[in-house]
Image: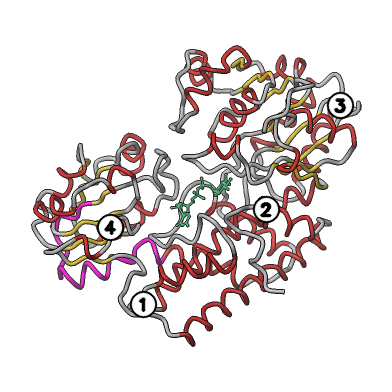
Amino acid sequence: MMKLRDNMVTIAMFGTGYVGLTTGVCLAELGNTIICVDIDAQKINNLKKGILPIYEPGLDKLLEKNLDKIEFTTDGAQAIKNADVIFIAVGTPSQSDGSANLDYVRNVAKIIGKNIESYKVIVDKSTVPVGTADMVRDVISTYYSGDFDVASNPEFLKEGSAVDDFLNPDRVCIGVASKKAKSIMLDVYGNMPDDKIMVTDVKSAEMIKYASNTFLALSISFVNELTQIYPNHNIRHVTAQMKETINQKGFFNIGLGFGGSCFPKDVKEFLHTFNVNGIESEILDKIITVNEKQKTRFVPVIKDKLGNLENKKIALLGLAFKPNTDDMREAPSLALISQLKSLGAQIIAYDPIAMTEAKHYLNDSIEFSSNSLETVDGADALIIVTEWEEFKQLKPEEIESRLSNPLICDGRNVFSEDAFSQVTYIGVGSGKQKMTDEELTVVFNSFFNTTALYKDALHQLASKVSANIEDVIHGMMLDSRIGPNVFRE
Ligand code: UGA
């Protein structure tokens, strides 16, 4: 139940990418006044007309609803002067050593330092390594000697359901260093139920984000690795039992691995943080290795069934890294296409939303189709890469009748084997063999050993970077996809 607003806050939001834009629009929905700032004048002009630079379900309608509370501008200096709170939501791309590039964050801090004239709370919203708030404080202090606070308010939004995640969160995590900053941040989230708000120190908040994302990536790689170790077993039964045991909702879906702008980048950055702090963690390395292997797991299967792939026509349904987004960053489809093409295969692909974006990555190296069934026409094999709802609605018999060769590799378990009568259907982790009780015990022990190792590594890191480990673990477990029972005491 939403509370009635007491205080409305004026917020400057630097960055109108996925995070900044969604956060800005949703904070307006919570009753705040927002000034969205971006250096890209074209983007700002479009936003003024209600044209969004990204595809995110529900965001256009929410923007329209809150237009009276949102201003779009390229004038950062003025926005800083007018705001009570300044959010930094600019990009932090990965560098070759895995660390996040903080140049954009540093630039915004500099602009703030040069233009701030009175007390403000500056909030790191971008996913930034532990210690970034200190850096932001130092940069601002170079130019400004007055009072201000730097807070950390990590986002836990999933692309494709970001609006709903924002408005109905598992938790809102606020890391602050003063009572004044705490009170202002509680005003910002004044319309959010109290039991959703978790207040910590700044470093713990920074660490919770990485600890959570890395853990989620770890759980995906754990179950995907099971499909590599036990190729003939039904792993989907096993993951169902695991979810029940640890009381975790919505994750552990096996498939062609994770992509996107967050998990791959955040795992690498977290690994980098462990390394620079002299903490060894084998399991973190493995998250990425397993994931890379998983993206192309069907290539040997297809080679086995079709022999030489030279000029064989392979149809791909789905290009985006997951459904309900047009985001192609680190999409498993890219690694898969690259490997199939290197073996001489001809690729034809279709994605309901991501094709324009995909063309920036693939140019004319593959053929793009205009609908699902046309993609499958005359193909030697079909690979389902993204679990779009549209694909779930396809009639199995129509797919079968259009394929020139009867092979379907279902990378997201959209269908099941019994849906098809005339084709060889291969899912991920949907082998026929059932795990024995002994094998199940081994898997469960291995999972809990892995989570214990992870927790131990977090302990070591928290003590090095002066974060509160209890808060970090608590903040992780509040995520319903991680759950309260992931660590066996
Ligand atoms: C992820 C986190 O889930 C968010 O909580 C976080 O805020 C966000 O990163 C971020 O750091 O900004 P996102 O990358 O949008 O969100 O997408 P997810 O839905 O988590 O999926 C990530 C990848 O994992 C996708 O490729 C998806 O297909 C894959 N995945 C997800 C699986 O393979 N199995 C699953 O069970 C879940």
- Of mark 1 and mark 3, the one earlier in the sequence is 3
Residue 256 in the image: state x and y as whole percent.
38, 60
Q: Quadrant of residue 383?
A: bottom left
Give how far apart the Cα atoms at labels 4 and 3 are.
60 Å
User: Eyeballing the image, is 81 above or below 344?
Assistant: above
Q: Residue at x 78, y 38 (%)?
A: 151
Residue 120 in the image: state x and y as whole percent.
82, 26
- Mark 4 or 3: in front is 4
What's drawn in magenta, residue-wise?
293-315
- Of mark 4 and mark 3, the one earlier in the sequence is 3
| Disc number for residue 144 | 3
| Amino acid on which the number 1 mark rests in the picture | His
Say which residue label 4 marks.
415
- Mark 1 or 3: in front is 1
Residue 285 in the image: state x and y as whole percent.
56, 68
Total numbered circles? 4
- Of mark 2 and mark 3, the one earlier in the sequence is 3
Give how far apart the Cα atoms at labels 4 and 2 are.
32 Å
Asked if disc 4 is less than 8 Å from ligand 1, the answer is no
Position of the C terminus by quadrant: bottom right
Mark 3 crowd level (few <14, some 14–19, many ≥20, 10 Å Cα): some
Position of the N terminus by quadrant: top right
- Of mark 1 and mark 2, the one earlier in the sequence is 1
Q: Residue at x 41, y 81 (%)?
A: 435
- Of mark 4 and mark 2, the one earlier in the sequence is 4
| Amino acid on which the number 4 mark rests in the picture | Phe
| Disc number for residue 478 | 2
| Disc number for residue 233 | 1
Give how far apart the Cα atoms at labels 4 and 1 are.
17 Å
Give how far apart the Cα atoms at labels 2 and 3 are.
37 Å
